[in-house]
Image (cartoon, coloured by chain):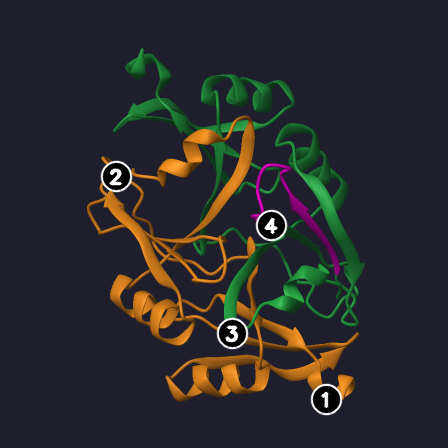
Chain colours: A green, B orange
Amino acid sequence: MKLKRTARKSSGTRFSYTGIRVRDLQRSLRFYKEVMGMREVSRGKTKAGGIFVQLRNPASSQRLELNYYPVKARYHEHYDSGSELDHLAFWTRNVDEQLRRITSKGGKIAVKPFSEDGYRLAFARDPDGIWIELIGLDRKKRK
Amino acid sequence: MKLKRTARKSSGTRFSYTGIRVRDLQRSLRFYKEVMGMREVSRGKTKAGGIFVQLRNPASSQRLELNYYPVKARYHEHYDSGSELDHLAFWTRNVDEQLRRITSKGGKIAVKPFSEDGYRLAFARDPDGIWIELIGLDRKKRK
């Protein structure tokens, strides 16, 4: 597993990234790159047979790792939907526009846009059904 | 929902944080704060009845949000273990020592420490069973 060299300067323990399990690596890469604007930071293969691709948006250091386990990989499992991962949150300048962008690419809506406490919010689903929160300023309220 | 004011300077869409669902907020706060060294950034309640607490380690901007849904909250659900969240990765100076720290506080081991490609790795479980990856340099190999 390769990590960015900058990580070596840090000490102690610190949260580094979130790894999600994907059932179709190319499908998920298309979603997170083409629709959510992320770029590939690194990719590799573990000795246990898993493939990982790390992504981030140019304007953020927050990293997301896609984990793909081929059928013969040690950690391959039947995919079940569960409760652990509540949502992945993306700060978005224009929530309504980004949601339209997601649906135009075939993405599904989980919760339609709404306003709360000065923010504009909406939830979509990634290709595996993971809830994607879109959050930005409620611009109508501020003008 | 309150976010840090610095977020307002950014434009476009960018991954902001990961939200995990917790069944016992105090138990999870103890784990992520006392064992994993995270600190509270913000907390609040959504109109749908959910409680959120955002955490980060002092040396990292990566944020983790704990989402707790009381029984009467809109998004409360029966908790099922699923495949979406593969792991949360923590960069750790001393993987073996941090794993001992986790087990001494009652945490469970998922995968015992091993070395791979110059890194030291181990996996533990958080209070809800989420896999916590500990990753650091394989110091024995480097000396």
Residue B99 is situated, as x and y percent measured from the top left of the image, at 51, 83
Residue B13 is situated, as x and y percent measured from the top left of the image, at 55, 30
- Side of A96 where A32 appears, left or right: right
The label shown at residue B140 is 1
Q: Is mark 3 on a helix, strand or loop?
A: loop
**10 Å crowding of disc 4: few (<14), some (14-19), many (20+):** many
Q: Do the residues labelled 2 and 4 touch (CB within 8 Å)?
A: no
Name the residue tied to disc 2.
Answer: B46
Instruction: Please say if A101 is above or below A3.
Output: above
The label shown at residue A64 is none
Instruction: Please say if B105 is above or below A52.
Output: below
Q: For marks 1 and 2, give the CA distance.
A: 48 Å
Q: What element carries label 4?
A: loop
- Quadrant for residue A112, please give it: top left
Q: For marks 3 and 4, give the CA distance.
A: 19 Å
Say which quadrant the N terminus of chain B sits in.
top left
Name the residue tied to disc 4.
Answer: A63
Instruction: Please say if B77 is above or below A70.
Output: above
Residue B23 is situated, as x and y percent measured from the top left of the image, at 31, 61
Q: Confirm whether the magenta stretch covers residue B48.
A: no
Q: Residue furthest front?
A: A9
Instruction: Please say if B142 is above or below A95.
Output: below
Q: Do the residues labelled 3 and 2 touch (CB within 8 Å)?
A: no
Q: What stretch is highlighted in magenta?
A: A51-63
The label shown at residue A12 is 3
Disc 2 sits on a residue from what chain? B
Residue under the image location 19 percent in, 46 percent down: B72
Residue under the image location 46 percent in, 81 percent down: B108
Residue under the image location 36 percent in, 41 percent down: B4
> Which numbered disc, 1 or 2, marks the residue that appears first in the sequence?
2
For discs 3 and 4, the disc positioned in front in the rendered view: 3
Q: Which amino acid does label 3 sit on?
A: Gly
